[in-house]
Amino acid sequence: VSQKGGSLRILTFNLRTSYAYGDGVNHWEKRKEACAETILNIRPDLAGLQEVDPTMWRTLEPALSDWHVLKGTAQTGDHENGNGLLVRKGSFEVLDSGRFWLSDTPGLESISFKQDWGPRILLWARLGSFIVAVTHFDTNQECWLPSARVVLEQLGRIAGGTPVFLMGDFNTRGGGPAWSEFQKAGFRDAWIETGGGEDVFTYHEFTGRTSQARAGLTGSFSVAHGNSRLA
């Protein structure tokens, strides 16, 4: 993403939770070094991570000494899970940070919409002249639009007109109702802005192969959005 005085390299990355014990040879324990190396090789200025649990952080955090690491837990208990933000040290100062839940009571760990997998959050940080945030929408399509509205309402209050970069796995498609809600609010799809063309179905079950067909409503589709004043 270009900005005054240079450019930003921004990464959004769903790491796939270590609780997915049925992943077999693709379980976190088999690929944890590769995931850490991927982040190190890309060397993002900012990164938004999804599905990061405490076991995963124990591997990742020691390798991420060049970044401020912010963690946001969405669900407590036996399957503690959530999002993470990486902010490159020496480039940005984290002035403030926080989280809220994607529900009618965003200040509390809660579920208000029909969901498949439990509570969801948005994790945010204020970095000088802009806000950076990461979220992960549930797979149930009935929650996508209300989740988008909660994100916009809460981020609008937090940002107060400050430009926002929003990263995440939205589990929906470009052009759908949730995507359109962000567009109406002034966000721009980084995939489109960088010439990505048609949406790519990014859920590939560890095959590395992505379909060029437009992502379906049940697909896992990660995009980064930026406020029009920066993107």
Image (cartoon, rainbow, N blue to C red):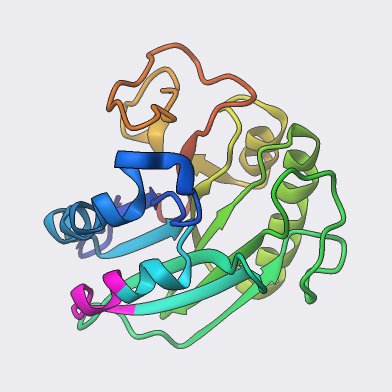
User: Between 3 and 203, which is closer to the camera in this rendering?
Assistant: 203
Res 130 visible = no
**Image coords of residue 85 (percent x, y):** 41, 69
**Image coords of residue 149 (percent x, y):** 76, 50
In terms of image quadrants, where is residue 203? top left
User: Between 87 and 211, which is closer to the camera in this rendering?
Assistant: 211
> Is 108 drawn above or below residue 136 in the view shown?
below
In terms of image quadrants, where is residue 59? bottom left
> Is 62 drawn above or below residue 119 in the view shown?
below
Residue at the image position 80 percent from the left and 46 percent from the top: 146
22 left or right, relative to 113: left
User: Between 38 and 21, which is closer to the camera in this rendering?
Assistant: 21
Res 25 visible = yes
Q: How many marks?
A: 0
Residue at the image position 70 percent from the left and 39 percent from the top: 181
4 left or right, relative to 105: left
**Image coords of residue 58 (percent x, y):** 33, 76
> Is 140 drawn above or below residue 100 in the view shown?
above
Tell me where the magenta segment starts and ends, as one range: 59-68
158 left or right, relative to 20: right
Q: Residue furthest top?
A: 213
Residue 6 inside the magenta-drawn segment: no
**Image coords of residue 208 (percent x, y):** 27, 27
Residue at the image position 45 percent from the left and 62 percent from the top: 52
138 left or right, relative to 115: left
